[in-house]
Amino acid sequence: MIEQTIDFERILAAYDVFPLPEPRRFGSGHINDTFLVEAEDGARFVLQKINAAVFRVGAIANNLRLAARHLAKQHPDYLFVAPIPTLAGDELMELAGESWRLTPFVKNSYSINEATTPQQAYEAARQFGLLARNLDGLDMSRFEATIPDFHNLSFRYRQFQEALAATTDARRSTAQDVIEYFLKKNEIVDTYESLLQNSDFPDRLMHHDTKINNVLLDADTQQGLAVCDLDTLMPGKVISDLGDMIRTFVSPVSEESSDFEKVVVREDFYRALIEGYLAEMKTVLTETEKSAIFYSGLFLVYMQGIRFLADYLNDDVYYPIQYPEHNLDRASNQMVLLQDLYRKEEALRGIIQNALSDQ
């Protein structure tokens, strides 16, 4: 496949930035096109083309503008990696129907794709908690969904049911055991819908994509520096951020692994991320939010599992696959992780209670 030529000179001139050498691809994300820019004066930036097929571009700009203003006023020392305006004062550089943004490269920072130590899990979770705490109290009516229904479990469950009704007999038969398990655990959907009716379960400005590679660490101290990749910063529930950390931090292998015996909940990593998040958010969370901490892992793992499964049943139209049963294996991976969360529920609830009780 021939890659489209990008007019970097024209894009970056809008910011009065002149790259030397040409920008190069950067990071491990698959949604936006991301490039590292090294300018003539030695400054470094991250340039991204926002994928308008996935995101509501105007909503991203609105949410980041409002969040940046709040943080600059209320928490001026907080490192918020916000986009740099163009020379004309625009939040985005528009060229040939595409939207580009430029953000500063945080000096002496790095990111990792997997948590290999509990301390990394603690630092990352604490950064996500600090962001949420600093954004606490904002008027959510001014913020917009950048991906509508992104973490709406009721919506995802309906998609799963529709896929199940429309799939072929062959795919239904191949996936039968996984289908039956996720249908049996639909009480997770019932709990979600019940929580939404609870006035003590507020909307907050959540990150919604709390994988560890969305936290920048200090190259010298390995402490957390900042949260990045803010496209999904939008109104939501605390279970989204906590759940995605649990889903992606606690297993020694990722959702891509088909070695299901290795898909387990590492209790020391679970403890680290819970303690890190609650170090910032314990005094902010309502009693209902605290009671839903264990559920958050069930919520996100279940939702991602049925998304993979629905895509398999739909003939793999959304997630890129490397082999025919790839999405089914991904769904099976999440099923095994969900099973281990249930298996270790008593111990994990004990970890949560200890973290909530610590002074």
Image: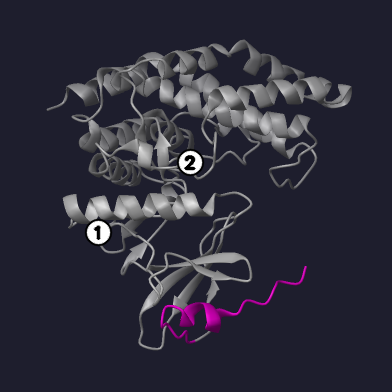
Classed neighbour count for the residue bearing mark 1: other residues with Cα under 10 Å, few (<14), some (14–19), many (≥20): few
Q: Nearer the viewer, residue 115 or 57?
A: 57
Q: Is residue 260 above or below residue 9?
A: above
To which residue does mark 2 refer?
Answer: 145
Quarter of the image with the C terminus is top left
Name the residue type under label 1.
Answer: Thr
The answer, for residue 229, to whether it is visible in the render is no
- Labels 1 and 2: the sequence-earlier one: 2
Residue in front for this viewpoint, 175 or 153: 153
Residue 101 image position (x, y, % from top left): 47, 66
Q: Position of residue 138 (x, y in %)?
A: 27, 39
What residue lies at 27% left-to-right and 38% top-to-bottom?
A: 276
Q: Residue at 35% across / 37% down in the picture?
A: 140
Q: Quadrant of the N terminus?
A: bottom right
Asked if residue 136 lies left or right of residue 358, the reply is right
Residue drawn at x 41%, y 17% as measured from the top left: 195
Residue named by callout 1: 221
Residue 156, relative to residue 15: is it above or below? Answer: above
Dot 2: what SS?
loop
Q: Quadrant of residue 345?
A: top left
Could you tell me which secondary element the residue under label 1 belongs to? loop
Q: Magenta segment: does it hold 261?
A: no
Judged by its main secondary structure, the magenta piece is loop
Determine the image quadrant of residue 189. Answer: top right
Residue 220 location (% of width, % of height): 26, 64
Above/below status of 199 relative to 44: above
Q: Are marks 1 and 2 in contact (CB under 8 Å)?
A: no
Distance in Å between CA atoms under marks 1 and 2: 35 Å
For the point 48% across and 41% down, the residue is 145
Residues shaded magenta:
1-20
